[in-house]
Amino acid sequence: MFNYNTKAHKFKFQGEVTVPGDKSIAHLAITLGSLASGVTQIGNFNYADDLAVTARTFQQLGAKIHTEVNTKAMVIKGLDHQLKPLDEPLNIENVGTLESLLLGALASSPNQYEIVGGDYLSKRPNDRLVELLQAMGASYQPLGENSLPAKITGSENLKGIVYHQDISSAQIKSSLMLAGIYAKSDTTIIRKQATRNHTEVLLNYFGGDVSVDPATIVVHPGAHLKGQSITIPGDFSSAALYIAGALLSKGSQITLPRVSLNSTRIGLLNVAKQMGAHIYVDNRSINSVEPYGDLIIKYQKLHGTTITNKQVPFIIDEIPLIALMASQASGQTVIEGIHDVHLQLGDRIRNMRVELAKLGIVMQVNDDTIVIEGDQEIKVKDDVDSHNDHRIAMMLCIASILTDSPFQIKNIESIDVSYPSFIADMNKVLVNK
C-alpha cells in the first residue's frame, strides 16, 4: 500500500502533456489480434497493469505477443481462433473489461477453461452476461458462491440470439459480439440506448461483418478475422483529468495532443460544453480507424446542468470528475438515469461520495440520480482513500490542486491500472499560483 501526500498550494495547469494510448481500444486490439490470423501491429500502446493482464491471458491461450516498451509498440501473431487447451486457470485479476471480452471469446471454443479473478471481480455479478452466453450454447459453471472462480466450456455450434438490451452495458454488448462472430446464425442486439462503439468499429476493421443502425447491431457469422495495424489515439478518460483540472483552476491553459475523439467516448467534453466551457480542437485526424485531435483547454467558470440518462453511458468512467466539476460550478447539477451504472459500478459511486465528503463536497445519491449543488468550498476534513479505484484516486489528485490544505491519498498505486505515469506527468504541467 502506498500513500500520496498532496502539497499545501493551489496550482494551475500550463503547457502540454501527451496522455497514454486508449485503454479500451487496446483491450480490444489485443483480443481481436489474438483471435485473428496473421500479424497485428499496435502503435502507441499503453503499458498499464490492466493491459498487461489482458496480454498475459491471450499469451496463455497461445497467441505470440512481443512488446517494445521504448517505442510503445506491440506485435501479435494471432491464433486464427485455435485457442490452446489449458490445465491451469486464467487469472484475470480485477480487469472487468477482460472478463467480458474473454467470456465472449471462449464461448465458441470447445475446450473447458477455468477463470479466477481478484476480490472485486469475484464479487461483481455477471449473471446477465452468463445467461445470454448460455442461451447461445456455452456452458458456465461457478465453482463457489460468487461469480468467479468459474469454468466455461464453449460450443462450436453456437446459435445467434436476439438480445433486447435491458442493461446499457458496452461490456455485455462486446462479449455477445465476440461470441456472435463464430455463431451459426445472426446475433442481434436491439439497443436500449447507444453505448461505446469501439467493438463495432474494430470488429469490422479486422474483417468482421457487423451491421449497425441507431436501433440495432447485427453480427453476421462466417467472417474471417485478419491481423491489422492500428495506432491507438490518446485515452480520453486520461485526458479528462487535465480537462477538468484546467477548467477549474484559474489561469490554466493546457494542450493535449492526439486525443481520441470517438463520439461515444467524449461525454465529458459534451457535459463541459453544457456547463459553459469552450474547448478548442485542432489537427483533427482524417481517415483514421478511430478519430483523434489536439485539445486546447483554458480556465472557465462553469455553471450547473442536467445530464440525461441518454448521456450517462458516455460518461461512465468520468462520473467522479464530473461530480468534482459540478461542485465548483455555479448552480445545481443533476445526473439522471444512473441505475445501470449502479448495477455495474455501485462501489465507485458510493466511494466517490464518501471521499469527496472528506473534502467538504456533498451530494445526494439515490438509485437513479445524483444531485450536486455548486460553489462548494473545498474544506479538508480528513485524509482520503482511493478504495483501490484508479478513477477515484486520480480525481482526488485533481481536487488537491484546488486547495491550499494538504491531505493524504491512500492506496495511490491503484493508478497503475490505467495511467502509471499520471502523477509524474501531472507534476510537469503544474505551476504554483
Image (cartoon, grey):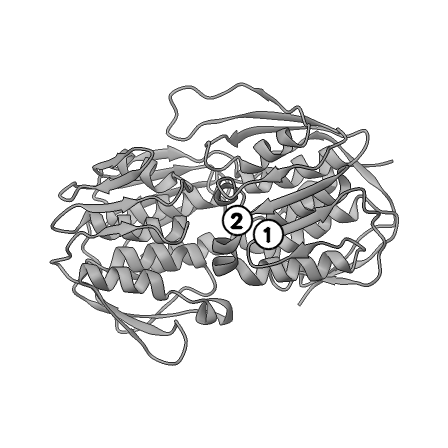
Which residue, given by chain and number where applicable, does mark 1 sit on?
369
- For residue 175, say whether it is visible: yes
Percent position (x, y) of residue 29? 36, 43
1 or 2: tag closer to the N-terminus: 2
- Quarter of the N terminus within the rendering: bottom right
Compared to residue 433, the image places residue 298 above or below, namely: above
Three-letter amino acid code at the position of disc 1? Thr
Residue at point 34% right, 43% down? 191
Q: Determine the CA span between mark 1 and mark 2.
A: 6 Å
Percent position (x, y) of residue 368? 55, 54
Percent position (x, y) of residue 54? 40, 55
Compared to residue 295, the image places residue 102 above or below, namely: below
* Residue 43 picture quarter: top left
**Residue in front for this viewpoint, 86 or 213:** 213
Residue at point 26% right, 39% down? 227
**Residue in front for this viewpoint, 393 or 339:** 339
Percent position (x, y) of residue 15? 72, 29
Three-letter amino acid code at the position of disc 2? Gly
Compared to residue 25, the image places residue 134 above or below, namely: below
Q: Is residue 50 left or right of residue 1?
A: left
C-beta proximity under 8 Å, tags 1 and 2: yes
- For the image, the number of numbered tags is 2
**Residue in front for this viewpoint, 196 or 70:** 196
Q: Which mark is residue 337?
A: 2
Could you classify mark 2 by the number of other residues whose Cα lies within 10 Å: few (under 14), some (14-19), or many (20 or more)?
A: some
